[in-house]
Image (tube, rainbow, N blue to C red):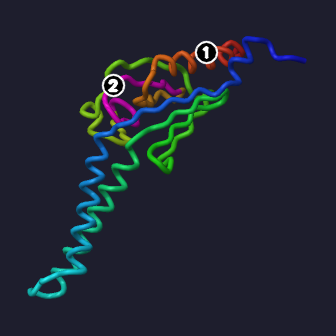
């Protein structure tokens, strides 16, 4: 038997992404901190003892790694919606990652203005009064209302299309419920 035309549109996978090029500047700051730590370790004219030198080297390298990897993890976000779930992947290695089954989604709304300032910065954020969010830049986003009362917000390009795709995939499962 063949699928009905209305069901065949749900077999497709929708993908979207958002990028923040400004975070590359922060990544450069992290790389500079690491370079400073390496420079101190290799070519130091430090005369006041080994302990302050070790603390400076370790501090610079640790701060550099934290800033570098923390910013590279949120340079971009990729969203994938298929017939059973929505998957969010951050950064170049896809971590952090969140997979939300569409059976757990009650609704999806378009948010025209999502800003890092409202969420406390870039990254994977949680605020008790707002829910959870992945914010990589300011602009449009998708707000998912989950069955447990929580919300999940994602900044993404073409968020209106994502909302339409998610809503279309929610309706068949909602009509089957009693």
Quadrant for residue 5, please give it.
top right
Give residue 44's position: percent from left, percent from top: 17, 81
- The kind of secondary structure the magenta stretch mainly shows is strand
Query: What segment carries the magenta color?
Result: 129-146
Hey, which residue is sitting farthest left in the picture? 48
Q: Which residue in the protein does label 2 denote? A: 139
Q: Residue at x 72, y 11 (%)?
A: 6
Q: Considering only vertical position in the picture, is 144 above or below 68?
A: above
Q: Quadrant of the C terminus?
A: top right
Give residue 75's position: percent from left, percent from top: 38, 43
Nearer to me, 51 or 32? 32
Q: CA distance from mark 1 to mark 2?
A: 23 Å
Q: Residue at x 56, y 25 (%)?
A: 105
* Image disc number at residue 122: none
Dot 1 falls on a residue whose secondary structure is: helix
Q: Earlier in the sequence, mark 1 or mark 2?
A: 2
Q: Is residue 97 left or right of residue 35?
A: right
């Amino acid at each position: 038997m063949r699928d009905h035309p209305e069901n065949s549109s749900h077999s497709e996978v929708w993908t979207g992404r958002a990028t923040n090029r400004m975070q590359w500047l922060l990544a450069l700051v992290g790389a500079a901190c690491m370079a400073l730590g390496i420079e101190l370790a290799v070519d130091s004219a430090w005369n006041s003892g080994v302990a302050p030198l070790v603390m400076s080297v370790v501090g610079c390298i640790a701060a550099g790694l934290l800033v570098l990897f923390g910013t590279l993890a949120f340079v971009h976000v990729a969203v994938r919606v298929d017939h059973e779930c929505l998957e969010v992947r951050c950064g170049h290695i896809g971590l952090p990652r969140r997979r939300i089954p569409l059976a757990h989604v009650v609704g999806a709304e378009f948010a025209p203005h999502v800003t890092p300032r409202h969420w406390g910065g870039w990254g994977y954020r949680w605020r008790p009064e707002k829910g959870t969010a992945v914010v990589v830049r300011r602009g449009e986003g998708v707000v998912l209302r989950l069955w447990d009362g929580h919300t999940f917000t994602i900044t993404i390009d073409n968020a209106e299309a994502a909302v339409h795709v998610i809503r279309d995939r929610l309706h068949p499962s909602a009509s089957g419920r009693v």
